[in-house]
């Protein structure tokens, strides 16, 4: 029986066997990756350079764009390189690093989206206390808690996963190293530790989701009490981008990890993983910029200074 120490590399899922389709995958991912780099890079630069956007909401959006850039850079370049060179190999250490970074960045994004829902709740439901609850160093402390918690979560999962023994080959049924697919290769009796971590993770995920739902219930109630239609529209429009980002993130992750085994298939797993690991980080800049007049005005001032 081989164990983790005897495995020097894993084999990632290839999108296609023919050279033409491999190149098509390369160019398609390259286009999406460049769009994500451009969109998130513009948001980061705009918020950093425009003092009008130095507010809690845009501070959190700044962090979100950094996380999106990091998460898509963790998975896509390696997949592109494999398609370009016609290989699926990834070393054991590269796989471990990829698992850690992906878990770290994706969990931090989910925690940050939860914090952003609290930001919108305070802004709409308790506007007079906004400066007190989210002013000064409060935002920095929240962001630090998000990054720190996600780091510990990813470290625990990664170290536990790669301490298992692998005796069922080294072919990962995914285009990047992902814990559920790696666990399928394990034959270790220590899987109960990972199961316990997964249970704790589910509790945290559900807790964050409940917090987001409760926040938006309170937000909707507050918006409906605004007497003028223009005021309701303005208040609600500030939440639409965040709500769209949360919906995209939660829906794709839910389908990926909680779908019934009866409808599970390699093709469905691949499509869903592309949605949450590739499309979502590229879509967030578009979601936040389309309906955000302040971002568009700041971008104009950055590109066309007067």
Image (cartoon, rainbow, N blue to C red):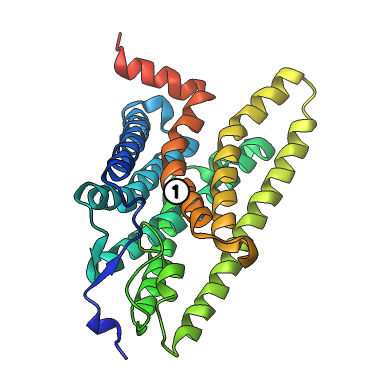
Residue 237: % across, % down: 62, 27
The residue at 74%/45% (across/down) is: 217
Percent from the top left, x then y, of residue 301?
A: 35, 16
Q: Is residue 26 above or below residue 183?
A: above
Quadrant in the picture for the N terminus = bottom left
- In front: 227, or 102? 102
| Location of residue 146 in the rendering, given as x and y in whole percent from the top left corner | 45, 57
Q: Secondary structure at mark 1?
A: helix
Q: Position of residue 26 (x, y in %)?
A: 29, 42
> For this view, does 286 lie left or right of residue 231?
left
In the picture, measured across the screen, residue 227 lies left or right of residue 186, that is right
**Quarter-wise, where is residue 97 in the image?**
bottom left
Q: Which residue is depicted at the point 21% across and 75% down?
A: 8
Report the number of numbered marks: 1
Residue at left offset 30%, top offset 68%: 96
Which of the pair 95/174 is nearer the observer? 174
Badge 1 crowding class, 10 Å Cα cut-off, few under 14, some 14 to 19, many 20 or more, is some
Q: Quadrant of the C terminus?
A: top left
- Residue 260 lies in quadrant: bottom right
Check the image and name the residue furthest to the front: 18
- Above or below: residue 292 compared with residue 108: above
Residue 300 lies, with reference to residue 265, above or below; the image says above
Left or right: 291 in relation to 26: right
The one nearer the camera, 254 or 137, is 254
Which residue appears at 53% of the width and 80% of the height? 196
Q: Tell me the residue that label 1 is attached to.
A: 274
């Amino acid at each position: 029986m081989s164990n983790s120490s005897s495995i020097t590399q894993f084999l990632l899922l290839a999108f296609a066997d023919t050279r033409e389709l491999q190149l098509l995958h390369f160019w398609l991912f390259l286009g999406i990756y460049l769009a994500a780099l451009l969109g998130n890079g513009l948001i980061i630069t705009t918020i950093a350079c425009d003092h009008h956007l130095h507010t809690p909401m845009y501070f959190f959006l700044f962090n979100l764009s950094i996380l999106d850039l990091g998460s898509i850079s963790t998975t896509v370049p390696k997949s592109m390189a494999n398609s370009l060179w016609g290989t699926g190999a990834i070393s054991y250490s590269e796989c471990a690093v990829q698992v850690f970074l992906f878990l770290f960045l994706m969990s931090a994004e989910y925690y940050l989206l939860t914090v952003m829902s609290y930001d919108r709740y305070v802004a709409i439901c308790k506007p007079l206390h906004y400066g007190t609850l989210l002013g000064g160093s409060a935002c920095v402390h929240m962001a630090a808690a998000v990054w720190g918690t996600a780091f510990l979560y990813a470290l625990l999962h990664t170290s536990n996963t790669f301490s298992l023994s692998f005796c069922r080959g080294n072919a990962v049924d995914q285009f990047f190293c992902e814990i559920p697919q790696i666990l399928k290769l394990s034959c270790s009796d220590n899987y109960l530790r990972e199961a316990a971590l997964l249970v704790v993770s589910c509790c945290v995920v559900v807790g964050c989701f409940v917090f987001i739902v409760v926040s938006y219930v309170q937000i909707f109630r507050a918006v409906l009490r605004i007497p003028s239609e223009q005021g309701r529209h303005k208040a609600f429009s500030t939440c639409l981008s965040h709500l769209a980002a949360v919906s995209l993130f939660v829906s794709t992750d839910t389908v990926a990890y909680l779908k019934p085994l009866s409808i599970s298939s390699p093709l469905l797993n691949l499509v869903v993983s592309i949605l949450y690991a590739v499309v979502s980080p590229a879509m967030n800049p578009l979601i936040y910029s389309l309906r955000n007049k302040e971002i568009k005005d700041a971008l104009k001032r950055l590109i066309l200074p007067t």
